[in-house]
Image (tube, coloured by chain):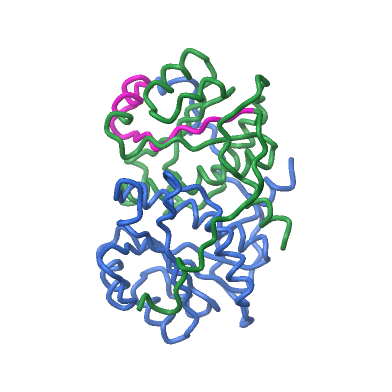
Chain colours: A green, B blue
Amino acid sequence: MSKEIDFIKKRRSVRKFRKLPVTDEQVTRLLEAAMAAPSAVAKDPWRFIVVRRPEHLRTIAGFLPNGGFLPDADVGIIVCGDLDAAHSNSLSYLLQDCSAAIENLLLAASALDLGACWLGVHPREDRIENISKFCKLPENIIPVAVIAIGVPAIAPDPRTRYNPAYVRSEKWQ
Amino acid sequence: MSKEIDFIKKRRSVRKFRKLPVTDEQVTRLLEAAMAAPSAVAKDPWRFIVVRRPEHLRTIAGFLPNGGFLPDADVGIIVCGDLDAAHSNSLSYLLQDCSAAIENLLLAASALDLGACWLGVHPREDRIENISKFCKLPENIIPVAVIAIGVPAIAPDPRTRYNPAYVRSEKWQ
C-alpha cells in the first residue's frame, strides 16, 4: 500500500480539540489545498470565510444541530459557492466543486496533524438562512458547509468503509 | 511544505493515456480511497460501476461532450449516488458525498502514478438519461460523474489555483 493512500485513510472526523492555536500559515496551506481541487470548467466557484473570533464561532455553532463543539475549534472555515461563478450557474456543479475542495482541505488538515470536521449546512434551509444573515452573504453566495479545525485531542485509527457491495462491473444489472 | 500537501497539488486532470493496463488491484485501491471519504451521517450513498470493455467505454464517451478521450483510458468508473440511501434522501447530500469520494479517488490515482479525469454527468439531463438507460440504472440511482483512469502519457506540473480574493475574514462584509 502506498504511503499516500494510507494518508487518505488517516483522515478521520475530529470533534475534540486541544486549546492550542492553528496558525495563519496553516490556514493558508489548507486553503491552497482546497483550491487545488478540480472544478467544472475550472470555474472555481468556491469562496471561504475564515472565522476565528470565539463569539462568532459560538453564534455559528448555535445554527448547527451537530456543531456544539465548534467553539472548541480554533478556526471555523465557512465554505460557500458563488452561484454566479459556477459553471452554467448550476447549483449541482457548485456543490460538487465545493465538496471536492472541502475534501482536499480535510486531507490537508490531517497532513498537517490538525483535526477537522465537516459540518453540513446545505440543503438545510434554516442553516442556510441563519448563516447567510449572520455573515451578510449576498444572494448569489450559497453556504455549503462549516469546517471546524483545531489541534486534535484524539487520534482515531485510519480506516476505509470500503464495501464491495457498492461496486458493480460494466453495468448496474 | 509537507509532502502530503504537495501530493494534493500533484493531482492534475489527465486526458492522455499510454496503452498500458490499470490492474484490478489498483482499481480496488482507488475504491478503498473513495470510500474513505466522509459522508453525511455516514450514509455512504456512493455506488461505483467499473467499466473496462472498450465498446462500453466508446458508447459512454458518446454521451459526454468532453469525453472523447475516454476510450483511451483503460478503465472508466461511473460514480453514482443512491437517493434512497442518501441522508434525508437529499440530492444535495448525495452530490456532496459522491464528490468527496471522487476527489479521494482522483488523489489516490495520482498517488499510484495513474492519470485520471473527472467527466461531469449531473446535472445534464441528456447525459443522466443516456447513462441511466445504457447502464440500466434503477430510478433511485443518480449518475454523478465518469472518471477516466489510465497510465498517464503526460505529467503536468503540480499546482494550486489559490486565489486570496476568494478568502474573507469573519464575515462576508
* Position of B112 relative to A149 (above/below): below
| Rendered image quadrant of residue B29 | bottom right
The percent position of residue A126, horizontal first and vertical second, equals: 28, 29
Q: Position of residue B6 (x, y in %)?
A: 69, 48
Left or right: residue B105 versus residue B131 is right
**Please, which residue is most extreme toward the top here?**
A55
Indicate whether residue A2 is drawn in magenta: no
Position of A128 with respect to B39 (left or right) is left
Height in image: B16 above or below B20?
Answer: above
Question: In the rendered image of this protein, does residue B68 appear above or below residue A29?
Answer: below
- Residue at 59 percent across and 75 percent down: it is B17
- The quadrant in which the C terminus of chain A is found is bottom left
What residue is at 65 percent from the left and 25 percent from the top?
A22
Q: Quadrant of residue B20?
A: bottom right
Q: Residue at x 45, y 66 (%)?
A: A166
Q: Is residue B91 left or right of residue A116?
A: left
Res. A104 in view: yes
Q: Which residue corresponds to the image point at 67% horizontal and 60% vertical from the top-left?
A: B111
State the image coordinates of residue B80 (x, y, percent, origin top left). Answer: 39, 63
B86 is higher (above) or lower (below) than A68? below
Q: Is residue A89 in view? A: no
In this orientation, which residue lies closer to the viewer: A155 or A39? A155
x and y percent of residue A150 in the render? 61, 28
Q: How many marks can you see? A: 0
Q: Quadrant of the N terminus of chain A?
A: bottom right
Specify the farthest residue to the bottom: B55
Q: Range of the magenta residues?
A: A129-150
